[in-house]
Amino acid sequence: MNPFIEDLSKKNLDDLLKTINDLYKKISWLSRMGNTAMINQLHGVVSMYQEEINKRYRDEVDAAKKNPIMKNSLDIG
């Protein structure tokens, strides 16, 4: 966890996705400038945002599996 990044669990999904998009734009610009050190730092930040999104999706799947309606459904995954 980076101490300079606010608590990602308090952001909504749209904000997380918008921030990731903005970070990739910055990474693209930095790659044209040849600033690999900053690119590596931003990739770490993107990873943190992506992990938060993945955690939310896993939580949604777990919640769906606990739903009584879903217990009798066929899991093809």
Image (cartoon, grey):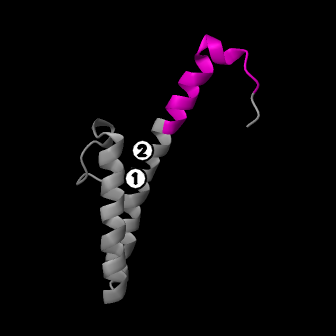
Q: Which quadrant of the figure has residue 4? A: bottom left
Please report the residue visible at 35 percent of the width from the left and 61 percent of the height from the top: 21
Is the stretch drawn in magenta largely helix, strand or loop? helix
Quick one: which residue is furthest to the top in this view? 68
Please report the residue visible at 31 percent of the width from the left and 54 percent of the height from the top: 18
Which residue occupies the foreground of this view, 65 or 7?
A: 65
Q: Secondary structure at mark 1?
A: helix
Residue labelled with disc 2:
52
Please give left or right for residue 23 compared with residue 65 in the image. Answer: left
Proximity of marks 1 and 2: CB atoms separated by less than 8 Å: yes
In the depicted structure, whether residue 16 falls above or below residue 56: below
Please report the residue visible at 28 percent of the width from the left and 40 percent of the height from the top: 11
In the depicted structure, whether residue 28 falls above or below residue 51: below
Type of the residue with mark 1: Met
Residue 35 in sight? yes
Please give left or right for residue 71 compared with residue 59 in the image. Answer: right
Residue 37 in sight? no
* Circle 1 residues within 10 Å: few <14, some 14–19, many ≥20: some
| Mark seen at residue 48 | 1
Residue 56 among magenta residues: no
* Circle 2 residues within 10 Å: few <14, some 14–19, many ≥20: some
- Residue range in magenta is 57-74
Please give left or right for residue 61 compared with residue 52 in the image. Answer: right
